[in-house]
Amino acid sequence: MNSAFVTGGIAIVLFVRIIIVWVFRCIRRRTETNSPPLKTLVILGSGGHTTEMLQLTKQLNRSFYAPVEYCRATTDTTSVMRLPDRLAVVHTIPRAREVGQSYVTSLFSTIYAQWHAMFLIAKIRPGLILCNGPGTVLPLCVAALFWRVVGWCPGQIVFVESYCRVQTLSLTGKLLYFWADLFVVHWEELHRQYPRSKLVDSFVRRQKDE
Amino acid sequence: MSSKNKTILVTVGTTQFDDLVQCVTADQALQSMANLGYYRLVIQYGKGLRPSTISTKYEIEMICYDFKSSLQEDILQADLILSHAGAGTVMECLTLHRKLVAVINSKLMHNHQMELAVALQQRGHLYMVEQPQDLWIPELWEAIDQFDPLPHPAGDEYAFPRLLDEFCGFRNNSNSSKIQ
């Protein structure tokens, strides 16, 4: 009984994995023939994450990436005031876990956040999702992956690690490293450890000798 | 270097860092500051405790506040900034080309902020102090005084858009350099 359960579980995991890999390849091919504009969802992570995200997206070509919509956590009220575009559509999502919340209650709030994220992504149908952490982005990325497997929306995930991370990835970064379609870091030290990542000098220009 | 007209700004950002505030207001640190010609000590103490009065024998004037909407003016007026290692404050000081000492909060475990401070120190942009108590060492202040930071080059705000355009297969009209 027990071993049948385990074997069944492994089979399901493998099956899902195969589908994901297959979908990844299909979407890769579609990307190359992508024609703008691409509906873009920018996830604001509060505080320093929002600062970085707004700087990263400041010079995006708005004829390629349109419409740009934003998503913030319900408890984050300051990020909206900092948006360059006052009329932008801003969605809200409940936080999976507040700082200091117990693990038992955070199980329920995570399920609730995930449930919410599923509907949100299905409604928005983004072509592209830009995120840079923290954990708030995870339910949205899971939802995007699900709807992509189902074929409802492309929802390509672009994850940009925080500029603070020089030697180690954040937990969100570690979890998204293998799924994100584009994974961006700011430091040579991280880029060397994670060869799938792309290196940009959005915050500090590198010297020639580095 | 003995002209008494220099200002130090101590900033802890949006949180609290009472160890740093206590260490800089102690006589051991004030003595070193006075020796190097600092006469004004501005302290932004955040959510922490407001520092008590300091000894008057060093003739250092102390100004304290918890928060300000923008620290930019105080950063520009300071000759030296002692800061927590938070990315926001560190980047602001470096962008404004100020001499910065990043003090690590040794009480925080798994302190990834140290990564950024170490990396920026290795590149010569700031001076890093591993714990606030080190500010009682006179030799450390000599080293800080002699430290000459390398200017911090501003980032390329088109770097990420270029990468994203290439990833999505959009042809960008700006000068597209190769992605690494």
Image (tube, coloured by chain):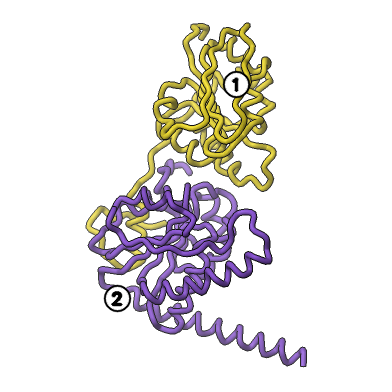
Chain colours: A purple, B yellow
The quarter of the picture where residue B132 lies is top right
| Mark 1 closeness class: few <14, some 14–19, many ≥20 residues within 10 Å | few
Instruction: Give the image location of residue A45, x and y in percent.
Output: 47, 55
Q: Residue at x 54, y 53 (%)?
A: A190
Quarter holding the C terminus of chain B? bottom left
Q: CA distance from mark 2 to mark 1?
A: 57 Å
Instruction: Give the image location of residue A103, x and y in percent.
Output: 68, 63
The reply to whether label 2 and label 1 mark residues of one chain is no
Secondary structure state at the residue bearing disc 2: loop
Residue A33's tag is 2
Most foreground residue, A53 or A176: A53
Q: Residue at x 47, y 59 (%)?
A: A73
Instruction: Give the image location of residue B109, x and y in percent.
Output: 69, 45
At label 1, which amino acid type do we have? Ala
Q: In this picture, is B116 found above or below A128?
A: above
Dots 2, 1 in contact, CB < 8 A: no
Secondary structure state at the residue bearing disc 1: helix
| Mark 2 closeness class: few <14, some 14–19, many ≥20 residues within 10 Å | few
- State whether residue A184 appears in this view: no
Mark 1 — on which chain does it sit? Answer: B
At label 2, which amino acid type do we have? Thr
Q: Residue at x 54, y 71 (%)?
A: A112
Q: Residue at x 59, y 53 (%)?
A: A168
Most foreground residue, A183 or A198: A183
Instruction: Give the image location of residue A125, x and y in percent.
Output: 36, 74
Q: Is residue A139 left or right of residue B164?
A: right
Residue B143's tag is 1
